[in-house]
Image (cartoon, rainbow, N blue to C red):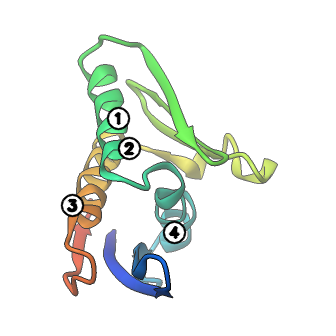
Amino acid sequence: MELKFYQTAGGTYPEVGQLFHAVAEVNSAQKDAKRYQLYVCSVLDAIAQIPEDCDRLLAAISSVESGVQASVTDGANDVLLNMSADGVQVDILINDDWTGQPQSWFTLEEWRKVLEQWKYCLQLPKGSDEVVILKLP
C-alpha cells in the first residue's frame, strides 16, 4: 500500500495570510485503496492536526508495545483509535457502519509508520512542494 502526504493551498485570508493544509491520500488503483482511504487517510486530519498530536498517539502505541498499558483508546473529532497488542481498531463514530469493522483493523507498526510520516509532513515549511510517500507492506 502506498500513501501520499503533501500540503495544498487552502486560500488567503486577510488576518492570517496564505493557509496550507496537509493532505493524505491513497493511489486509488491499489488493492484495499478504499479501506486505507477511509480508515487511515480520511481520519488523520481529525486525530492529528499538529505534530504534538502525532507525538501523543505515538507514545500511546509505544506504551502498548512495551506492555506498560494493555490498551489505549485515543482520538478526536468523532474518531477513536483503540490500540492493543493485537493492533489498532479505527472507529469513525459518525456512522455505525464505520465502527467495529474488520476492515478497520491495522497493525501497530502500520499506524506507527503512518503517524511518523504524517508528523513529518505537518512539520514541513508552509507551502512546501515536498511529497512524502509511505509504502506499507
The residue at which mark 2 appears reads as: 53
Which residue corresponds to the image point at 32% horizontal and 75% vertical from the top-left?
A: 4
The span from disc 1 to disc 3 (Cα, nearest Å) is: 14 Å
The span from disc 2 to disc 4 (Cα, nearest Å) is: 20 Å
Kind of residue at disc 4: Gln
* Secondary element type, mark 4: helix
Which mark is first along the chain, 2 or 3?
2
Which mark is first along the chain, 4 or 1?
4
The answer to whether the residue labelled 1 contacts the one labelled 3, judged by CB atoms less than 8 Å apart, is no
* Secondary element type, mark 3: helix
Residue 60 relative to residue 94: left or right: left
The answer to whether the residue labelled 2 contacts the one labelled 4, judged by CB atoms less than 8 Å apart, is no
The span from disc 3 to disc 2 (Cα, nearest Å) is: 12 Å
The residue at which mark 3 appears reads as: 120
Which mark is first along the chain, 4 or 2?
4
The answer to whether the residue labelled 1 contacts the one labelled 2, judged by CB atoms less than 8 Å apart, is yes
Which residue corresponds to the image point at 57% horizontal and 52% vertical from the top-left?
A: 103
Kind of residue at disc 1: Arg
Location of residue 40 in the rendering, given as x and y in whole percent from the top left corner: 47, 58
Give residue 56's mark: 1
Kind of residue at disc 2: Asp
Which residue corresponds to the image point at 48% horizontal and 77% vertical from the top-left?
A: 15
The residue at which mark 4 appears reads as: 37
Q: Does any portion of residue 136 appear in the rendered image?
A: no
Q: Quadrant of the C terminus?
A: bottom left
The span from disc 1 to disc 4 (Cα, nearest Å) is: 22 Å
Q: Does any portion of residue 41 appear in the rendered image?
A: yes
